[in-house]
Image (cartoon, rainbow, N blue to C red):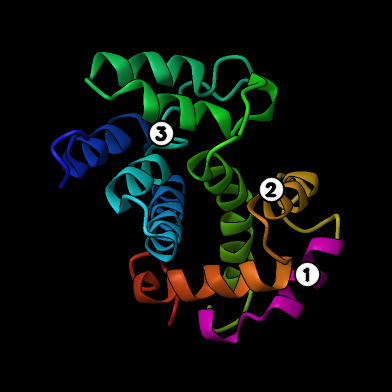
Amino acid sequence: MSSEWPSRELAWELLNRYTKNPNLVKHGLAVEAVMRAIAQQHGEDEDLFGLVGLLHDFDYEVYPEIGQHTIEGGKILLQEGFPDRIVTAIRSHVTENGLPRDGLLEKAIFASDELTGFVVAVTLVRPDKNLSDVTPKSVIKKLKDKGFARGVNRADVYDGTAGLGVELDQFITFIVDALTPHAEALGLNP
């Protein structure tokens, strides 16, 4: 691991210290996998992107309210020795924080968060929970169903992919491919 970033072990410990819901822990792991894949695709620092993905919602159970989520968590991360670069990227994924998403790191966490969770949700409602059966068409169909996964902000999904400069169907395929090696750990079938 790059010496400029705290260890993944510390990040994992923090995630598990503040997050007791196993589905939220799995969400952190899923977004970490997607963020690492984005970093690899673009020749960026996989450890940096992975830490942001793993920790982006670590404070959500304790501070779920807008105005607290990522703000209070950011204070904890700074106290634990995480640099401002990571804290700012994490805070940027909450639109209400009003932070610019100028860099790839910020664009990637914003684009990855909601859509990764949605792809996992689409997979989990399949009888066999088989990730390889999830297609862009099946995900887009569910996105149009406002009753499915109501907590997912559809505008953030569309804005995130646009900000990343990718087509929605391509990013869905990218997410499925990034999650496939981690399917079992996420409670899915590859």
Magenta region: which residues? 130-144
User: In the image, 173: left or right of 184?
Assistant: right
Q: Nearer the viewer, residue 45 or 75?
A: 45
> Where residue 67 sits: x, y (%)?
62, 14
Q: Quadrant of the C terminus?
A: bottom left
User: In the image, 156: left or right of 130?
Assistant: right
Q: Which amino acid is tagged 1?
A: Ile
In which quarter of the view is residue 34 placed?
Answer: bottom left
Q: Which residue is mark 3?
A: 58
* Residue 60 makes an appearance in the image: no
Q: Gap in Å between the C-alphas at discs 2 and 1? A: 18 Å
Q: Which residue is mark 1?
A: 140
Q: Which amino acid is tagged 2?
A: Gly
> Where residue 10 sits: x, y (%)?
19, 35
Q: Which residue is mark 2?
A: 163
* Labels 3 and 1 touching (C-beta < 8 A): no
Q: Nearer the viewer, residue 153 or 127?
A: 153
> Where residue 172 sits: x, y (%)?
63, 69
- For the point 73% across and 44% down, the residue is 156
Secondary structure found at label 3: loop
Secondary structure found at label 2: helix
Q: Gap in Å between the C-alphas at discs 3 and 1? A: 28 Å
Q: Which amino acid is tagged 3?
A: Phe
Q: Crowding at label 3, few (<14), some or many (≥20) Cα neighbours within 10 Å?
A: many
Q: Earlier in the sequence, mark 2 or mark 1?
A: 1
User: In the image, 9: left or right of 57?
Assistant: left
* Labels 2 and 1 touching (C-beta < 8 A): no
